[in-house]
Image (cartoon, rainbow, N blue to C red):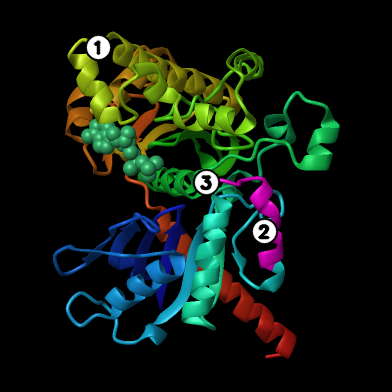
Amino acid sequence: MKILVLNCGSSSVKYQLIDIDKNYPLAKGLVSRIGMSEAVLTHKPHDRPEVKITGEIIDHIVAIEYVISILLSPNHGVIKDKSEIGAVGHRVVHGGEKFPESVLINSEVMVELRNCIELAPLHNPHNIRGINACQKILLNIPQVAVFDTAFHQQMPKHAYIYGLPYILYKKHGIRRYGFHGTSHYYVSRRASELLKKPANEVNIITCHLGNGASMAAVKEGISIDTSMGFTPLEGLLMGTRCGDLDPAVILHVMAREELSLQEANTLLNKHSGMQGISGHSSDMRDIIQEAKEGHANSRLALDIYCYRIKKYIGAYAVAMGGMNALVFTAGIGENSPLIRERCCEGLEFLGIELDEGRNEEAIGVEALISKDKSKVKVFAIPTNEELVIAQETKKVLEVNTFLKDIVKGV
Ligand code: ADP
């Protein structure tokens, strides 16, 4: 079966068409600048060169129509008929407590997904737009929602309740949810395979370091804690997000700078993190370059970035009562030996001993980067959220077919 995986953002649609029987992507691509002048569709079939097409793409419906057309195109396509697409798997950022696992989308699920918009107003509306667009274009093809929050839904209560009046949790769902779940799931499972141990026999700390960044403590296969919270703002220092902060700071700044709620939101989400500290860039490559050139605030941004990751490593090692592996993934985790080295520096007492040569060589590939004698194995593992979404989609369809057969008495 071929599964179309979609990740719909505010002005972009990322896609992959995956042959799920072979766990293999037939084509992948990105539509960017939706709704702006000169939208761009970048498409890469597995067996031919990448193509780039520019044009006007006014909304997500048109974007997904373009995606389907290029998948069918005689020159760049990988399928001959729309009906070859067996299902669509959507990345949905927030599933709240309602969705602890992936779900087949129907009208009741859509109502619940709309209810979750309140929890993730910056992300969920675009995911829903993508689902609606597919319903219009692909008609009766089954669609499955796979949630970023789901993997963290087994966290114990002591890890997810904030020190606020408990009534706020009951009334408004104010609690820690965690994000990047499909990525933490994928790399932790892959690490247990590399350790040659079942997932339920190992403790793993996973570091997803992209523009957004989060860590998870995966104890015996279950995420028991993670650094992002009610929204993807909590935790590590990120490209443009502040991460952990005394909540009183924002009240103080709002009062002193006379900021509206919207302005405060933008300050914390778009102008903070490495962007805010360096004053130059949110991109780790720029920050590293500027730090090398002696730019003091870029150095400071790097210091804070790595220090905070180290603090979480310590916290999660304690939360799990020790660990077997530490994993780095996503743009920074997969590609930056410098950041990995700085995050592991001085952690020998925890059993973490990085191998300099292995670390330097591991760029964009899966690799063991610790010394053979290191008690804790350290890995760089490229994440593969699309594959998890396709596998989850297949699983949900199989369960639903099985249930239907039971009801029918087959
Ligand atoms: P997103 O969260 O948008 O999916 P990515 O996982 O693509 O982000 O990660 C983007 C980040 O990865 C950027 O900060 C970028 O600078 C960083 N990055 C990519 N390649 C390298 C590299 N070779 N060295 C350091 N950072 C890198």
The answer to which of 361 and 302 lies nearer the viewer is: 302
Quadrant of the drawing holding the C terminus: bottom right
Could you tell me the amino acid type at mark 2? Arg
Residue 160 position in % (x across, y down):
69, 34
Q: Residue at x 59, y 47 (%)?
A: 149
Residue 87 position in % (x across, y down):
48, 75
Could you tell me the amino acid type at mark 1? His
Within 8 Å: ligand 1 and the Cβ of disc 3? no
Q: Which residue is drawn at 83% across and 41% down?
A: 171
Camera sees residue 279: yes
The region drawn magenta spans 109-122
Which labelled disc corresponds to residue 181? Answer: 3
Residue 28 position in % (x across, y down):
30, 63
Residue 197's quadrant in the figure? top left
N-terminal-most mark, 3 or 1: 3
Secondary structure that dominates the magenta span: helix
Which labelled disc corresponds to residue 295? Answer: 1
What secondary structure is found at the residue carrying circle 2?
A: helix
* Label pair 3/2, CB-CB below 8 angstroms: no
Q: Is residue 90 placed above or below 288 in the rendered structure?
A: below
N-terminal-most mark, 3 or 2: 2
